[in-house]
């Protein structure tokens, strides 16, 4: 194995945000000399989890490996606890011992389970002796799936394939947030035709579904042309972290990475712990309780911002009335 090639791949994976365990697994497989392989890691999601898979392949002309792509898939299944796995348990025949196959990704476990043609059991646990059954089948037909696991078992996870350029591009964290529907900020984008750099908020257009290539198209809101100024928008709300420079800097960085950080926001004179999301498309922030209930953003606004909002609403109403009056005049 070429050690410079290993160092390059480790740097690339680190730049993309791969975990130390994932990088170590990549190194282990590179040492075996296998022609191509994939390594995975699991990212937390607001609901369920995001499975990330990195695809590496050896050049046909040398021993060098290259990272071709990585994928993100949002699964609604409950994240596994430490040391747990998905287990496909097949009973033995005629007194023979059965078999147990382990999986760490719910998609692979479910797909493999559905392909069975006999009796089998899909479970979660550290091993077969410490399991929780989530699905069973007889003679190749699924006859039971727990209520809690049906979404993960029957649903098709939203997924996206990304092609990084030597560690540059959307990071694993950004991609994991985007596949959940959030927008992220990039200031290193390049116009394909002119080669000019630009900045924009970017999200997957999940409303239209995937295209012929199996990927979602990108929606972009250019900065500053689109008009979404994150610091100015944040100043419209009574968020305690904004008063502390270090906390404000981290809050803005998290929001630009598509995260939904927990903040202390004031409502009716009381402090609430809320999750906040940047929504550049509509020039606003969304606020949620930790259990996912949306809060009315107007109740969290400063007096000045609320007054401006009311003035803008009144002005809009006046313009609408004038347009209607003009229309009536023409009709007469």
Image: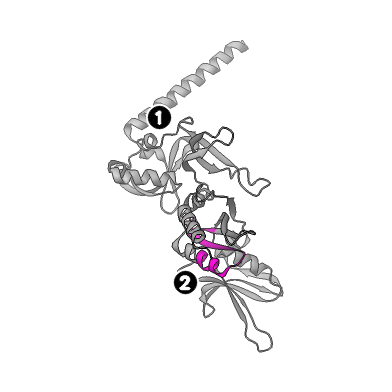
Residue 224, compared with residue 206, is above or below; it is above
Q: Is residue 106 left or right of residue 315?
A: right
| Circle 1 or circle 2, nearest the eye | 2
| Residue 44 seen from this side | no
Q: Secondary structure at mark 1?
A: helix
Answer with mark 1 or mark 2, whichever residue precedes in sequence.
2
Q: Specify the quadrant that holds the N terminus.
A: bottom right
Residue at point 41%, 34% (across, down)? 229
Q: Secondary structure at mark 2?
A: loop
Check whether the beta carbons of the residues at disc 1 and disc 2 lie within 8 A of each other. Answer: no
Q: Specify the quadrant that holds the C terminus.
A: top right
| Residue 152 occupies quadrant | bottom right
Q: Residues within 10 Å of mark 2 (few under 14, many from 20)?
A: few
User: At which x and y percent is residue 187?
Assistant: 46, 39
User: What's the mark number on residue 309?
Assistant: 1
Asked if the magenta segment contains residue 230, the reply would be no
Residue at point 59%, 51% (across, down)? 160
User: At which x and y percent is residue 277?
Assistant: 44, 44
Q: Residues within 10 Å of mark 1 (few under 14, many from 20)?
A: some
Return the residue nearer the eye: 40 or 244.
40
Return the residue nearer the eye: 46 or 304.
46
Return the residue nearer the eye: 16 or 172.
16
> Which segment did they paint magenta?
25-52
Residue 307, compared with residue 121, is above or below; it is above
User: At which x and y percent is residue 113?
Assistant: 64, 69
Residue farthest along the bottom direction in this orientation: 95
Pointer 2 residue: 83
Residue at point 47%, 23% (across, down)? 317
| Residue 291 seen from this side | yes
User: What's the mark number on residue 238?
Assistant: none
Q: Is residue 272 left or right of residue 319?
A: left
Disc 1 from disc 2: Cα separation: 51 Å
């Amino acid at each position: 194995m070429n050690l410079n090639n290993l160092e390059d791949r480790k740097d690339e994976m680190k730049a993309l945000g791969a975990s130390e365990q994932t990088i170590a697994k990549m190194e282990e497989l590179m040492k075996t000399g296998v022609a191509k392989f994939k390594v995975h890691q699991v990212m937390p999601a607001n609901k369920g989890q995001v499975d990330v898979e990195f695809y590496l392949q050896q050049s046909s002309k040398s021993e060098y490996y290259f990272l071709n792509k990585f994928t993100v898939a949002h699964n609604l299944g409950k994240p596994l606890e430490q040391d747990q796995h998905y287990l496909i348990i097949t009973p033995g025949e005629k007194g023979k011992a059965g078999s147990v196959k382990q999986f760490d990704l719910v998609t692979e476990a479910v797909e493999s389970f559905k392909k069975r043609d006999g009796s089998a059991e899909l479970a979660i646990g550290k091993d077969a002796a410490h399991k929780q059954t989530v699905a069973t089948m007889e003679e190749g037909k699924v006859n039971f799936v727990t209520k809690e696991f049906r979404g993960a078992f029957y649903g098709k996870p939203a997924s996206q394939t990304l092609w990084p350029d030597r560690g540059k591009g959307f990071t694993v964290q950004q991609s994991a947030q985007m596949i959940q529907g959030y927008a992220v900020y990039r200031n290193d984008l390049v116009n394909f035709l002119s080669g000019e750099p630009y900045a924009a908020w970017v999200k997957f257009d999940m409303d239209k579904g995937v295209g012929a290539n199996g990927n979602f198209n990108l929606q972009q809101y250019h900065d500053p042309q689109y008009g979404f100024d994150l610091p100015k928008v944040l100043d419209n709300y009574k968020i305690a972290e904004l008063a502390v420079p270090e906390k404000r800097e981290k809050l803005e960085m998290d929001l630009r990475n598509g995260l939904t950080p927990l903040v202390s926001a004031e409502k009716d004179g009381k402090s609430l712990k809320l999750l906040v999301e940047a929504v550049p498309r509509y020039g606003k922030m969304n606020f949620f309780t930790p259990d996912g209930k949306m809060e009315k953003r107007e109740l969290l606004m400063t007096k000045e911002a609320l007054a401006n909002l009311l003035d803008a609403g009144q002005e809009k109403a006046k313009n609408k009335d004038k347009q209607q009056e003009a229309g009536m005049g023409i009709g007469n």
